[in-house]
Image: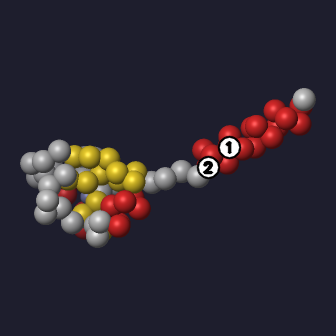
Amino acid sequence: MKTLSLLIFFFASMITCKETTTVYICNSPGAKKYHNTSNCRGLSNCTYKIVKVDIEKAKKEGKTLCGWEK
Ligand SMILES: [Zn+2]
């Protein structure tokens, strides 16, 4: 029984370790950048909605890390 709970713990920690990075993008048609923080300077002039997306999704859409983040 103890082994089982250890196994469950093991798998649960594996799931939480596999974290996906969430980035922020301005939901405008012309937005080409993603941001690590929602209060980034690059997002301050966003007149559209700021949305949270998976970093892989942002990259797939051709977005690159915003210049203010470096
Ligand atoms: Zn930014």
Crowdedness of circle 1 by 10 Å Cα count: few (<14), some, many (20+)?
Answer: few
* Residue 9 spot, x, y in % from top left: 75, 38
Q: Do callouts 2 and 1 mark residues in contact (Cβ within 8 Å)?
A: yes
Secondary element at tag 1: helix
Name the residue carrying label 2: 17
Q: Nearer the viewer, residue 42 or 46?
A: 46
Please tell me in which quarter of the rendered image ligand 1 is found: bottom left
Q: Which residue is mark 1?
A: 13
**How are the residues colored?**
secondary structure
Callout 1 amino acid:
Ser
Of residues 42 and 1, the one nearer the viewer is 1
Does residue 19 appear to the left or right of 67 in the view shown? right
- Image position, residue 70 (x, y; %): 32, 66
Check mark 1 vs ligand 1: CB closer than 8 Å? yes or no. Answer: no
Instruction: Tell me the residue at 75%/43% (across/down).
Output: 10
In the rendering, at what x and y percent does residue 19 appear?
A: 54, 51
